[in-house]
Amino acid sequence: MRKFHLIARAVILNGDSVLLARQKGMSNTFLPGGHINIGESAVTALKREIYEELGLELDVEGYLGAVEADWEDGGAEQFEINHIFKAGIKGTSLSSPLKSQEDHLEFLWSSIDDLYANNLLPHPLKKLIMNYAAGDRSIWWESTLVDR
């Protein structure tokens, strides 16, 4: 069985840290965001997902690029395309703790240097964020898929 996911994700920076999400009980992290519904724009989906996850309004500041990824989950092949946006959170101090609105998720600030230690997935996102933080503003694309 194969499953496809179209995802919108946010890079939310706070100084030298980036906001990450983790499903409770899992060892990997991911950027906040989620699935784009049929008929929904990526920006609308991202704003909706952040509101559902954190109860906060998002200010989408620009498109950073896309990352394709694949993995296996319980014998099923999974494929996703992640559209990545630079974003900020409206009307809240990023120094205050961010509380998840969903019981299965938790959020943490990670220094950019600790993205590998926090097992950010998909792996190409680490390089995208590190390059962006270093001043690279080119549109990014990378894939974990091997040409078949």
Image (spheres, rainbow, N blue to C red):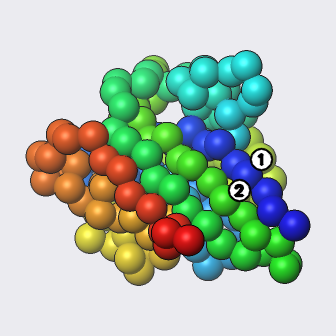
| C-alpha span from label 2 to label 1 | 6 Å
Q: Is residue 121 visible?
A: no
Mark linked to residue 2: none
Type of the residue with mark 1: Glu
Indicate the position of residue 130 as horizontal and vertical percent values: 24, 59
Regarding residue 122, the answer to whether it shows in the image is yes
Identify the secondary structure beneath mark 1: loop
User: Residue at left 35%, top 25%?
Assistant: 61
Amino acid type indicated by mark 2: Leu
Which image quarter is the N terminus in? bottom right
Q: Residue at x 37, y 42 (%)?
A: 65
The one nearer the camera, 43 or 148, is 148
Which of the two residues, 1 or 89, is positioned nearer the viewer here?
A: 1
Residue 76: percent from the left, percent from the top?
83, 72
The picture quadrant where one finds residue 69 is: bottom right
Q: Residue tagged by mark 2?
A: 105
Q: Secondary structure at mark 2?
A: strand
Asked if the residues shown at circle 2 and circle 1 are in contact, with their CB atoms under 8 angstroms apart, the answer is: yes
For this view, does 70 lie left or right of residue 88? right
Q: Quadrant of residue 138?
A: top left
In the image, 76 versus 130, the foreground residue is 76
> Is residue 52 shown left or right of residue 126?
right
Task: Please give the name of the residue rendered at 41% of the width and 36% of the height, measured from the top-left corner.
Answer: 85
* Above or below: residue 144 compared with residue 107: below
Give the quarter of the image for residue 62.
top left
Residue sitting farthest toward the left: 135
* Percent x, y of residue 24: 72, 68
Q: Is residue 71 left or right of residue 84?
A: right
Residue topped by disc 1: 102
